[in-house]
Image: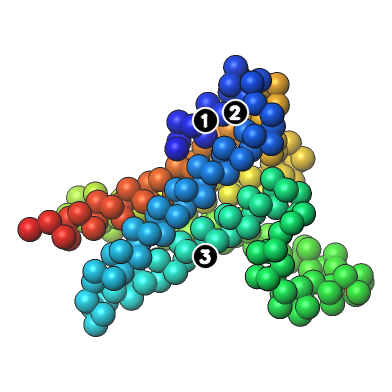
Amino acid sequence: MIFVSTIVYLPPLNNLLDPSQALAIYDACVIGSAILAAMLATQLWRSSERRETMSKIWGGIAIGLILWAAGEAIGSSDQIWGGESLTILSAVCLFTTAVVVVPIINDTTTFGVFEKVVNPLYPIADFLIALLATALVTLLMGGTLFGSWGHIATGLLCVAGSDLLYTWTLWQGTYQVAPTETVDFTSLTINVLYVMSYVLIALGLFRHYYMTESP
């Protein structure tokens, strides 16, 4: 998935594909790796004893990854179809639209304030994820769980780095959603890191499951 998400943005392959086709292939890599990570986390959750502390940890990770995978699917459909024919998005966001979006649209005097509050939360949350992931790697360094949790933490660092770069390039207006004739290596780095994050998390979950289930 990492390899495919890289070459789809590089010539000569991106010259053979329509931008929407290349975007669909990349989104498939993101969604596929996210679903894989969610499935592995769910399997670890189901295989652990309910009264154990790790059961709660795997449960939280599984729920988070399931929500991430759902978010990736919704975001992908919005990118590919341009907000049209999004039945799933309408069903999921009905309550949010009624409670949050409509009042914001009607009250134009506070929309600027709302935007200024929400936008900084994105990089701040990613920065906190990066700090927690780094602390996790440091704590488990050299231990038996480092092989699995090290991959998970590295995956979290990758998604944090990708999101931070994405926020910055989006602010600069330089992020390329779909491939173009000229390669923007910053956008390519953002996209590859994003897919890599899910792949590394899935690998860490698989290694932990294999380690705990092996006799």
Coloring basis for residues = rainbow
Quarter of the image holding residue 205?
bottom left
Marker count (numbered): 3
Seen at 62% across and 33% down, the residue is: 22
Write the residue at 7% across / 58% down.
215
Question: Residue 139 appears at what percent x and percent y?
Answer: 28, 58
Residue sitting nearer the eye, 130 or 185: 185
Q: Which residue shows up at 20% across the image and 54% down it?
A: 210
Residue at left offset 46%, top offset 53%: 34
Coordinates of residue 16 in the picture (x, y in percent): 64, 21
Q: Amino acid at mark 2?
A: Tyr
Answer with left or right where residue 36 lies relative to residue 68: left
Is the residue marked by circle 3 packed among few (<14), some (14-19), or many (20+) residues within 10 Å? some
| Disc 1 residue type (three-letter) | Thr
In the rendered view of the protein, which quadrant contains the N terminus?
Answer: top left
From the image, tell me which residue sits under label 2. 9
Res 20 visible? yes
Q: Is residue 148 visible?
A: no
Instruction: Give the CA distance from mark 3 to mark 2.
Output: 27 Å
Pointer 1: what residue? 6
Label 1: element kind: helix
For label 2, the crowd category at 10 Å Cα-Cα, with few meaning under 14, some 14 to 19 and many 20 or more, is: many
**Counting other residues with Cα less than 10 Å from the Cα at mark 1, is it few (<14), some (14-19), or many (20 or more)?**
some
Q: Sequence order check: which comes first, mark 3 or mark 2?
A: 2
* Mark 3 touches mark 2? (CB < 8 Å): no
Q: Amino acid at mark 3?
A: Leu
In the image, taking residue 65 as reference, residue 119 lies left or right, namely right
Judging by the rendered image, the residue that carries numbered circle 3 is 67
The answer to whether marks 3 and 1 mark residues whose Cβ atoms lie closer than 8 Å is: no
Q: CA distance from mark 3 to mark 1?
A: 25 Å
| Labels 1 & 2 near each other (Cβ < 8 A) | yes
The spot of residue 146 in percent (x, y) is 24, 52
